[in-house]
Image: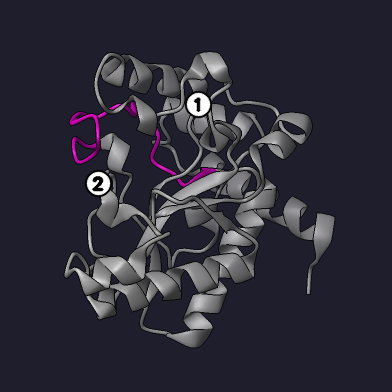
């Protein structure tokens, strides 16, 4: 078994080879590869991918990605996400992770900020003037779980829904009040247990968001994606 730095190098080489043979790769895909990021979905094709910011199905209500088609992450985060998919498949072979967002260049972050600036959504989008967030280092991922038919299992509210139903710190109260069901809570707990075992941490207000490290650690050890 390949481990440690050998695994990271293996992941990086596989991703570059995929990009080289993928003749229609978009410009931002090529740029992200040039920054040393890897396309996790090219390495493990059992992932489902639905990049929400390439569509209008997001908090901004319009597409903000132009040319990102892969699930790009820093190799350190990619290794953890690959582990999470393996853990899920071992536990429930008919389930799979579905990726909604991964690495995000600061240029895209600025576009997102421009769209929400002056609205009530500014609490949910990192201001690039403050250094951005972990997506801008390739160290965060937004995701959920799909069943064997490819349908996302219910988590009580949709991705990019910003209300109390998306919070993870008062879920028992959400069940008691009927805002989410017990089954939906169990689905969230399944996702969190897999991601935490793989080395990710959570945030309080988005059940779908997972960090591969702290923001302070990222700023010290990883380059921001411009």
Numbered mark located on residue 56 in the image: none
Badge 1 marks a residue whose secondary structure is loop
User: Which percent across, then down, holds residue 76?
Assistant: 69, 50
Numbered mark located on residue 161 in the image: 2
Task: Please name the residue shown 33% across and 26% down the image.
Answer: 66
Quadrant of the image containing the C terminus? top right
Label 1 neighbour load within 10 Å: few <14, some 14-19, many 20+: many
Of badges 1 and 2, nearer the viewer stands: 2
Quadrant of the image containing the N terminus? bottom right
User: Which percent across, then down, holds residue 106?
Assistant: 50, 21
- Is any atom of residue 67 visible in this view? no
The residue identified by callout 1 is 105
Q: Which residues are magenta?
A: 55-72
Nearer to us in this view, 55 or 117: 117
User: Which percent across, then down, holds residue 74?
Assistant: 64, 43
Task: Please name the residue shown 33% across and 45% down the image.
Answer: 51
Badge 2 marks a residue whose secondary structure is loop
């Amino acid at each position: 078994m390949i481990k440690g730095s050998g695994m990271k190098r293996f992941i990086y080489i596989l991703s570059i080879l995929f990009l080289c043979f993928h003749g229609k790769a978009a410009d931002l895909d090529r740029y992200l590869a040039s920054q040393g990021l890897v396309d996790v979905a090219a390495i493990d094709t059992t992932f489902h991918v639905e990049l929400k910011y390439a569509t209008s199905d997001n908090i901004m209500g319009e597409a903000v990605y132009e040319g990102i088609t892969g699930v790009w992450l820093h190799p350190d985060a990619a290794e953890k996400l690959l582990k999470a998919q393996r853990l899920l498949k071992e536990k429930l072979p008919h389930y799979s992770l579905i990726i909604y967002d991964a690495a995000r260049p600061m240029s895209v972050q600025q576009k997102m900020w421009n769209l929400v600036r002056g609205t009530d959504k500014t609490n949910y989008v990192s201001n690039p003037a403050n250094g951005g967030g972990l997506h801008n280092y390739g160290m965060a991922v937004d995701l959920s779980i799909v069943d064997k038919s490819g349908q996302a299992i219910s988590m009580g509210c949709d991705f990019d829904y910003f209300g109390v139903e998306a919070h993870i710190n008062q879920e028992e109260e959400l069940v008691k009040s009927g805002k989410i069901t017990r089954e939906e809570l169990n689905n969230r707990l399944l996702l969190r247990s897999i991601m935490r075992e793989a080395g990710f941490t959570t945030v309080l207000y988005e059940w779908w968001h997972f960090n591969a490290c702290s923001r302070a650690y990222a700023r010290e050890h990883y380059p921001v994606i411009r």
